[in-house]
Image: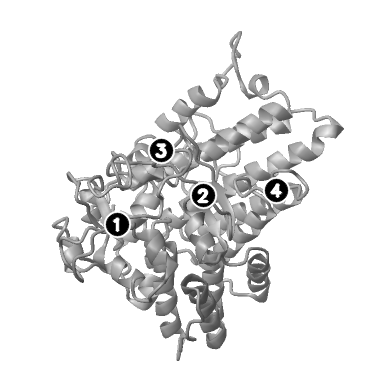
Amino acid sequence: MKMKTYKFFTTIFSSMVLLLAMSCSDATDIVQDGELNEAAAIKDVVDLQSALNSVYSSYGPDFGGNGSGDVIYFNAIFTDNLKSGVANNGQGSQAYGFLVDISGNSISEFLWPNRYLTIFRANIALNALNNLTIESTDLDEANHIKGQLLALRALAHFDLFQYFTSDYQNDAALSIINVDFIPTIADQFERNTVAETLAFIKADLNEAATLLDPNNSTSANPIFINNDFIDALKVNIALLEGDNSSTIMNLAESLLAKYPLANQTEYFNIFSDDSNAEVIFKLSRVNGTNGIGDLFYFNQVDPDDAYLEASNELYNELSEVPNDIRFFTNIDSQSNFIATNDPDNLLLIGKYPGSGDGLQINDIKVMRSAEILLIKAEMEARNNMLVEAATSIQDLRTARVGTPQPLPVYTNLNDALVDILKERRKELCFEGQRFLDLKRLGGELNIGVDRLSVDCESFEAPCNLEANNFRFTLGIPQSELNGNRVITQNSGY
């Protein structure tokens, strides 16, 4: 089935200039002399690799700074993991106050254009590849590149699916617009359904899995996509679908066997880019690229430079168990803790301390085996395997504390899910998960955003956002609405 075309506007036209000049397509299909279309720009496997690199570089969950940004920033500022920092001049106050705009520097205007730009670039390269004559000696390499392009396209669609879909398990509900080819200027379409979008993403992943070469030199490097990434993304998709089958559980078990949990030293070093322990896939960031530290600091991790700090509530949870390496990783040692919930506590975020590439620069860990273990625990709980779920959480806590931890006691599904949600907060804070976790589990558990008063008062903002609030599904951005007159906006916007 041919998927619907997305109408791209300002962002996509800019990308045409950045990537390559697309051919004009009017009633007579005139091609101008000297025009650089994809056929002229991508002539061989070397060019294909350059195009693939462009797709990798365009994908930006860490993009942003100075009070606005993509999903890593948004998941922290909109929920309960941040408070106003010592150097704050109003940065983040709108999102912290639950004011979800659909224009300007809103999360919708970051996420929607960025992921469709990534998709657009992938489709440019795929279109060129399909029209190339590949020498037999280059066929494996070309297929490996194609597999990565398809997987990146799937990842971008999955991001959009998570944020712009109101009901993940309602096949007929509206989701996003699925794009598997280069759009034309005149096309306008409604969003695809949940069923169509999930089928589309899975088709890309399944095809990618047949093309990726496990013997390719990039397959062992976590900054490139390999078959383990495909499996990890399938596990994430299954979580949203409610697929807790043995097939998915076995997939998770296989990944955990290949990517054992980091020990304490390795865990600390993951986020300074000195270890790849348990990292399934990460985005490479080097000198001259985006600096994730810009999301919280003006210039560097420094007591005088933070415009956003960790919330007292998160600090309290991270410090509950002595010697939990997640406390020492997420809370910088330069912090000044005065007393529990003291408004003058200086709680500096230390998860991204910088690296040899720069003070603000760290690789972005997109998928780690710890997340797979947390998903496995949730699936076990939903399969009424409460002891197994508790054991999974015990394993994670033992790895993080460095000594054997007690087995949690879950008497029912609700107990297990509440504890797993809490553990996800500790493990994945500042990694772009908290908002999505509250969206997915909040309605079921009646847990929304519930900030401590000392934290929300730092911004003079509301402390609570009820579970199932319409804001847990993002609105289609204004730039899309301006050009696509047939698309349906999400409820509440």
Label 1 sits on a secondary structure element that is loop
Query: In this figure, which colouring scheme has been used for the structure?
Result: one colour
What residue would you read off at disc 4? 219
User: Disc 1 or disc 3, which is closer to the eye?
Assistant: 1
Residue at 35 percent of width and 69 percent of height:
318
Residue at 41 percent of width and 50 percent of height:
352
Residue 65 percent across, percent down from the top left: 33, 41
Q: Do the residues labelled 2 and 4 touch (CB within 8 Å)?
A: no
What residue would you read off at disc 3? 484
| Image quadrant assignment for residue 328 | bottom left
What residue would you read off at disc 1? 78
Q: Is residue 474 visible?
A: no
Earlier in the chain: of badge 4 and badge 1, it is: 1
Q: What separation in Å lies between label 2 and label 4 (alpha carbons)?
A: 19 Å
What residue would you read off at disc 2? 273
Could you classify mark 3 by the number of other residues whose Cα lies within 10 Å: few (under 14), some (14-19), or many (20 or more)? some
Q: Do the residues labelled 2 and 3 touch (CB within 8 Å)?
A: no
